[in-house]
Amino acid sequence: MLKLLIVILSLFCSATASAATGERFIKENIRLGDSCIASARYNESLDFYIKALERAQEGNNHFLTEECLGRIGVLYCRFKDYEQAAIFFSRGYKSAEERNDDNEAYRFACYLMNTYCQTGDLKSARRYFAILKDIVPSNKAEKEYYDLYSEGTLAYAEKQYARAIRCYNEAQRCAARNGMKDEYSMSLYAVIAESYVGLDKPDTAIVIATLLMEEALKSGNTNQLGYTYEVLSKAYGEKGDSVLMKHYRNLSVTLEDSIYNLRNFNKARSKYSSIERRITDRHISFLNDRITRQVLIIMAFVVLTLILVVAIVMVIRSNINLRTAHRALMDKNADLMREQQNSRYLRDQYIKSIGIADDVAKADDNSGNIHDEAAGNNTDETGDTQTEPKMNDAQTALMIQRIMAVLDDVDIISRQDFTLQMLANMIESNTSYVSWAINSTYGKNFKSLLNEARIREVTRRISDTEHYGHLTIQAIAQSVGYNSQTNFIKTFKRIIGMTPSMYQKLSREMGEMPEDDKQE
């Protein structure tokens, strides 16, 4: 047990260490990518971001995956591949939404709104603008700033340039009011200048863009510088100065060629595509394995269900057959009781018809002889005789009549001390003649006949719930002479064919059945 615990702890520590190492690798590559962005080495930054993204996806690190997706999407925007950027931003937004991370979801909603404005998909842009307005991130100042910035960008895309300028100016005041970094305000000058171009105010746009260009040259912000060249080219074009328009366009193209190496960028994109294919293939393999397992589980469940249904059907059928057999036994028992009563009646009629009354006196006179003749006969305790006594049919019939008269008396047979000798004494005979009469008439010994009489009384009392329903089966058994519960159950089952409790249950069920069902 100790060794197993050590192995489990070792595996856990190994997995934890591996996860920690993987997270360090991801963060380090993100940091290197950010450094490349700062020095305008955009192609190299994409390589680092892709490495970090692959490891984050393999480790199911959703937060760092979103960090990589956001940075890669921004890079695609720099290369003006807005459609591909929207794909990365959408994946990041979906992941953040699933994690209920309002901060990340807000960031990606802003990305998507601005990206769709660039592609001209204003319907999607308006949808994500409504989404970002509803999201409440933790930083209230940044939300106020980006809400205004996004509103201005959407207004510009809708060619509502005056409204765009108002939103951008309000965003600048928000940044100043909340003590935000200068870059928040500086980044707005280019879009304000471009908005003035849309308002047919190229001179104002040129003034703002020129100041921004000088600031970008001082700070070495090549990304801001390239955008300023584009705005100046548009402003001079709007003013009708084709020379300066071409001049700033050439500067913009030259700068883009120097910092955006499309050839290397496409290599990085191709590398990412191969990574995506590997990840997709692994995901498909995982899904196929899961589907296979689910199919096997479903098949096993179906098979087990079928087996269970068959077993239930068999049990039900068995119970039905068993109950039918038990009811048949009860019906047979009732028929036997009726036949016994009928047999007793016929025996009495037979005795009367043959004039047995005339022979009674003779039989009584010879009783002393019967006792004497039987003195030498052997009779065991159960009433089995080994020597056949000399009795004619009339004597036998008379003796059986007397025997049954005694056995019909419930009070007598219910005595626990009732024996063959007591029965012989009651009918003024001896055990040999009594036992022989029982054996020759019924084919059984005294003990069996007594048990049948007692069990018949038990079944009658079980069925008579009106008078005996308050008694337990054990109490009823004791009331008819059974002191041993085990012996009683064994005897009852041998005679009736079922246990006393089953007989009681079926008797009650049949008592509740309609008369038509009982007859069936």
Image (cartoon, rainbow, N blue to C red):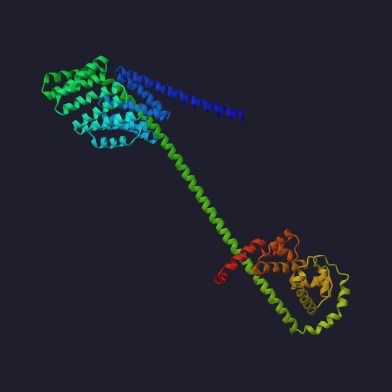
* Image quarter of the C terminus: bottom right
Q: Is residue 488 above or below residue 292?
A: below
Q: Nearer the viewer, residue 351 or 127?
A: 127
Q: How many marks?
A: 0
The reply to whether residue 91 is in sight is no
User: In which image quadrant can residue 92 be found?
Assistant: top left
The residue at the point 56 percent across, 27 percent down is 7
User: In which image quadrant can residue 275 be found?
Assistant: top left
* Image quarter of the N terminus: top right
The reply to whether residue 396 is in sight is yes
Q: Nearer the viewer, residue 77 or 137?
A: 137
The residue at the point 33 percent across, 18 percent down is 36
Query: Looking at the picture, how far across and down is residue 182, in whole percent?
Result: 29, 21
User: In which image quadrant can residue 415 be found?
Assistant: bottom right
Instruction: Please give left or right for residue 111 compared with residue 56 in the image.
Output: left
Instruction: Please give left or right for residue 480 compared with residue 62 in the image.
Output: right
The residue at the point 31 percent across, 18 percent down is 38
Query: Looking at the picture, how far across and down is residue 493, in whole percent?
Result: 68, 62
Q: Nearer the viewer, residue 150 or 51?
A: 150
Instruction: Please give left or right for residue 299 compared with residue 165 in the image.
Output: right
